[in-house]
Image (spheres, rainbow, N blue to C red):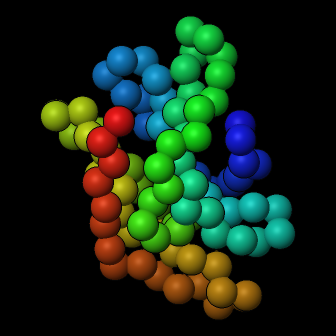
Amino acid sequence: MNWARAGQTATLLADGRVLLAGGVTASGETLGTTELYDPTTATFTATDSMGTPRTGHSATLLQDGSVLISGGEQANGFIPIYLRSAELFTP
């Protein structure tokens, strides 16, 4: 991966690639980065970042091939900030 992360989502896309979105670093920083994993080449490619960094969110593959990313939280020291927002990722 381009960024070490935990708490991310991994969504299998129709073309066989996997979208990795968000998560948190070992130091507790919430990530807004996304990347695509291609199992045919075993490579990770950075893509556009999300509008809002988030971890513990959901990611749902929609019929048109886009991914709805919603909810989750941002790290703020020991106090989480819960998110009530969503964004759409179109590979």
Q: Is residue 41 visible?
A: yes
Q: Is residue 7 above or below residue 85?
A: above
Q: Quadrant of the rendered structure where residue 69 is?
A: bottom left
Q: Is residue 81 above or below residue 86?
A: below
What is the quadrant of the N terminus in the image?
A: top right
Q: Please, which residue is most extreme toward the right here? A: 27
Percent x, y for residue 79?
65, 90
Q: Is residue 6 above or below residue 18?
A: below
> Residue, x 52% and y 74% (percent of image)?
73
Q: Is residue 21 visible?
A: no
Q: Please, which residue is most extreme toward the left here? A: 64
Q: Please, which residue is most extreme toward the top here? A: 40
**Near-viewer residue (72 or 88):** 88
Percent x, y for residue 33?
57, 55
Percent x, y for residue 8?
58, 52
Q: Is residue 60 above or below residue 65?
A: below
On the rendered structure, is 59 left or right of 4?
Answer: left
What is the quadrant of the C terminus in the image?
A: top left
> Residue, x 24% and y 33% (percent of image)?
65
> Residue, x 42% and y 67% (percent of image)?
51
> Residue, x 66% and y 86% (percent of image)?
76
On the rendered structure, is 78 left or right of 32?
Answer: right
